[in-house]
Image (cartoon, rainbow, N blue to C red):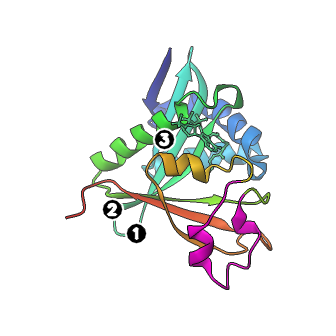
Amino acid sequence: MIEFRQLNIEDKHYFNEMARLLKEAFEDYHDEKETIKELETMLQEDQIIIVALKASTVIGFIGAQRQYKQTGYELHPLVVKEAYRFNGIGKALVSRLEEAVLKRGGIMLYLGTDDEDYKTSLSQVDLFEDPFTAIKTIENYKNHPYSFYLKQGYKIVGVMPDANGLRKPDIMMAKRLIPFK
Ligand SMILES: CC(C)(COP(=O)(O)OP(=O)(O)OC[C@H]1O[C@@H](n2cnc3c(N)ncnc32)[C@H](O)[C@@H]1OP(=O)(O)O)[C@@H](O)C(=O)NCCC(=O)NCCS
């Protein structure tokens, strides 16, 4: 059975496992000690972290921090252990995070999802020429996670061309969490 739990400052014992998960999934998180410091700061600054636990072991987690004027939150990071992917855990983490953000008065979640390995059609065109058409006609070549977020109701609201190097954009996505009246 998988259990979901929102962490508080007493839950530091999960940080080693969380740092390892990030290291497995992202090159930028190669230094586990630095990652643990970052996680500690996240909790001290009252950000949201929710873990997915199987037999008390962390198999995924999601975070968010308040930005803008209190109501816009940035979703970061999100990771599910490779062996457990495509089982609905990512979806469940996003949904629980949305509930937690709403409880704190947030109304919008956004994120940037990088294309650093030419996984989408956005890496094939000059995004400075016509970013809007490139977004409208985006194609997923190799399981880029933007498709995962589309399924959770997030929209592509922009691109940051060359954010990670030439032809390596950041794809900006967002979701409104309340009705539009
Ligand atoms: C992205 C990630 C969190 C998804 O987690 P997951 O637990 O595998 O996702 P789920 O099983 O909840 O998937 C929900 C839906 O999205 C789809 N999906 C999941 N990952 C996908 C991907 N990479 N590409 C396309 N579709 C994907 C699933 O097939 C499922 O579709 P369905 O509802 O039609 O059945 C996971 O692949 C991961 O940790 N990746 C590495 C880290 C990463 O890229 N994080 C995001 C950085 S912005």
Circle 3 residues within 10 Å: few <14, some 14–19, many ≥20: many
Say left or right for 138 vs 31: left
Q: Which mark is residue 89?
A: none
Q: Position of residue 148 (x, y in %)?
A: 56, 46
Q: Which mark is residue 71?
A: 2
Tell me, yes or no, whether the highlighted magenta stretch contains residue 152.
Answer: no
Amino acid at the residue labelled 2: Thr
Q: CA distance from mark 2 to mark 3?
A: 17 Å
How many numbered circles does the render carry?
3
Q: Is residue 41 visible?
A: no
Mark sitting earlier along the chain (2/3): 3
Q: Quadrant of residue 163?
A: bottom right
Magenta-drawn segment: 120-140
Q: Position of residue 105 (x, y in %)?
A: 27, 54
Q: Which residue is most to the front?
A: 137
Amino acid at the residue labelled 1: Tyr
Residue at (74% x, 49% y) in the render:
142
